[in-house]
Image (cartoon, rainbow, N blue to C red):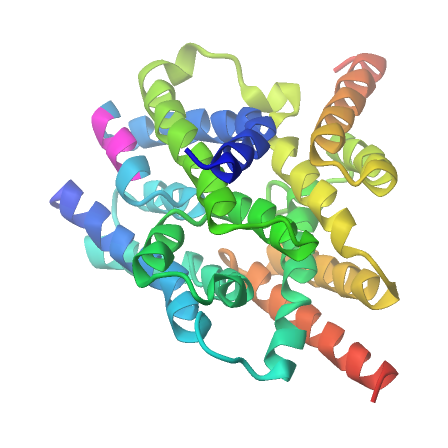
Amino acid sequence: MPKDFQRGFIAMLPLFPGLIAFGLLYGVLARQVGLAPWQAWAMSMIVFAGSAQFTAVGMWNGAGAFAIILTTLIVNLRHLLLGASVAPHLRGLPGWWKVILAFWMTDESYALAITEYEKGSGSHWYFLGTSLGVYFIWPIASLLGALFGTVLPDPARYGLGLVFPLTFLGLLASFIKNRTALWVALVSGGLALVGAIYLPGKWYVIIAGLLGSLLGLFLEERNSP
Amino acid sequence: MNVLLVFFGMALVTFFTRYAMIALIGHGNLPPRLLRWLHYVPPAVLAALLAPAALAPQGKLDLGLPLWAVVAGVLIAWRTRNVFWTILGGLVAFWLLKLVVGL
């Protein structure tokens, strides 16, 4: 097995506490709305999209299949931005590699992989390693949550919900190389915060991500015409 | 409602959002301006994922313990630029603060 695959998988390990915490919580909620444990597990295996799964479970009773699928599409639209950002690094790969990497791409694996790509040490095997790290633990945690979730202690009490923001923070640091990048992060973070409070779903990631990155382009072109 | 059919429908639209741009611009030569823009997407997206998760985890502004744990994380991330230490340091800060506040 390529060394980069192992490197990617290992890089995902520190995120496991966060993935387990959210997976357990998802399993508990899935059970509460009437999904069987195997169905909670199957959704994690087949759909494999945390935010969309939480949203789908939240509307499971009452909304029809079409509404759930449409909402899934909307919640996942942010992946267009992630895909665009990682796409230039995937040029030259065979088509089936792009399909595989796309199917298993999550916010978390994208974040680790793009950071590695920008440092010059990224590769498709590393990307796949991070993604399969998530794919390994997320369905297991979902199943355990659905089976035993109600008797387990609440992970939020131990601050495990902080694992993802802290991860994104640690990764963000390596992108803040100059004043422009700092402004991009500050403006995007501020917009996202306002957006998360006032906008539905995950629109805040798309809007803040788009405006923040366009600000970066604007500042760069203004400074070096 | 056929549960598995719903799952496959969800999987299909999810795959579309993940694959569309990779298929569209994942080959050939790209305009320099597009590449310059894409260069700023990671810091923008990471900040956009981070800020609400830290400051408004429930969708409402919450300036409690998580905020201070993340402030500690900012210092560690800035000094170390290392994901592992940032996670560990932020969590330890959270646990210590929790002990001090006694919640």
Residue at image location 55% in from the left, 34% down from the top:
A7
Q: Quadrant of residue A221?
A: bottom right
Residue at image location 28% in from the left, 30% down from the top:
A41
Residue at image location 71% in from the left, 62% down from the top:
A188
As drawn, is B23 to the left or to the right of A37? right
Foreground: B102 or A22?
Answer: A22
Residue at image location 39% in from the left, 48% down from the top:
A52
Furthest residue to the top?
Answer: A151
Compared with B75, A192 (above or below) is: below
Furthest residue to the bottom?
Answer: A225
Residue B91 image point, x, y percent? 72, 24
Foreground: A82 or A127?
Answer: A127
Q: Is residue A96 magenta?
A: no
Most frequent secondary structure within the magenta stretch: helix
Task: For the N terminus of chain A, give its image quadrant.
Answer: top left
Furthest residue to the front?
Answer: A2
Q: Is residue A40 magenta?
A: yes
Compared with B102, A12 (above or below) is: below
Residue A209 image point, x, y percent? 62, 65
Task: For the C terminus of chain A, give its image quadrant.
Answer: bottom right
- Numbered marks: total: 0
Compared with B29, A10 (above or below) is: above
User: From where the camera sits, is residue A71 visible?
Assistant: no
Compared with A95, A154 (above or below) is: above
Foreground: B91 or A104?
Answer: A104
Residue A181 image point, x, y percent? 79, 63
Residue A153 image point, x, y percent? 52, 13
**Which portion, as a residue range, is magenta?**
A38-43
User: From where the camera sits, is residue A206 visible?
Assistant: yes
Q: Quadrant of residue A214?
A: bottom right
